[in-house]
Image: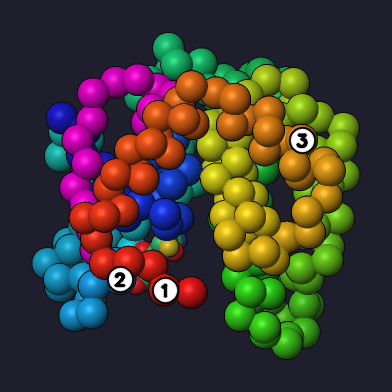
Amino acid sequence: MLKFYHTPWSRSAGIHWLLEEIGQPYEIELVDIRAPGGVPEAYRDIQPNKKVPAIDHNGTIVTERAAIVLYLTEVFPEAGLAPKPGDANRADFLTWLVYSDSVFDPAAAARAQGWEYRPSAFSFGSFDDMVRNLEKRLAKHPYIAGNKFTAADTQFGSGIHFVMNILKVLPERPVFQDYLARVSERPAFGRYMAKDAELIHKVTPIAF
Ligand SMILES: N[C@@H](CCC(=O)N[C@@H](CS)C(=O)NCC(=O)O)C(=O)O
């Protein structure tokens, strides 16, 4: 049994997309992170910070997006969504997968919140350095880990879509638009987006 704790139109989007790419049966447990009364305390037993995503795979609970990606690609290797240990692209896959959560996301969130901070005081550094690095990478490679689509693209694809098109924080540069156009051609992308468009009506509406 594979249970996915999820909120549509949230940071669990990339894992939703990944599950559709993998194509194995899973069930969604909706977590209403925007509910006026908050998420029930009982959910802390699954995710200690009461955040999404989380998964429960036959009783094994995994939290944190990068860890969930690594776990799922390990358990379902036949999906071919991660370079295997020893593969020349493995280091880039790991680097960018972790960069997504440890630099891209917090730098974008800090910008969206209008934070002023000393980049050297925070592990994610400056927003401009992050944008420059991401732009350089995607100008040279069609996918974030190299020439092949991987599970790191489910994280960057969903992240860039949210930060550029919804939050309007990431500059709308051709390299980001081309990347999004490329990854969103995938049938699994269309499936997860369609499912989320239905599920969004079952939780408290998002407020920006
Ligand atoms: N470190 C977590 C962060 C996940 C996260 O920030 N989730 C947001 C989704 S937008 C959330 O659940 N927020 C609800 C809240 O904090 O109340 C991960 O990478 O999995």
Question: Amino acid type of disc 2?
Answer: Arg
Please report whichever mark, 2 or 1, sits nearer to the chain's N-terminal start: 2
Residue plotted at (19% across, 47% down): 29
Look at the numbered disc 2 and give the secondary structure of its residue: loop
Residue 68 - label: none
Q: Can residue 18 be seen in this view?
A: no
Pick whichever, 199 or 145, lies toward us: 199
Look at the numbered disc 1 and give the secondary structure of its residue: loop
Is the residue 32 above or below the residue 193 in the image? below
Please say if the residues under marks 2 and 1 sit with CB atoms less than 8 Å apart: yes
Q: What segment carries the magenta color?
A: 18-32
Question: Amino acid type of disc 1?
Answer: Ala
Residue 178 - label: 3
Q: Is residue 78 visible?
A: yes
Ligand 1, image quadrant it occupies: bottom left
Alpha carbon distance from label 2 to label 1: 9 Å
Q: Position of residue 175 (x, y in %)?
A: 82, 41
Q: Name the residue under label 2.
A: 34
Please report whichever mark, 2 or 3, sits nearer to the chain's N-terminal start: 2
Q: Is residue 7 left or right of residue 43?
A: right
Label 2 beta carbon less than 8 Å to ligand 1: yes
Look at the numbered disc 3 and give the secondary structure of its residue: helix
Is the residue 155 above or below the residue 142 in the image? below
Based on the displayed image, in which of its 4 quarters is residue 87 positioned?
Answer: top right
Q: Name the residue under label 1.
A: 207
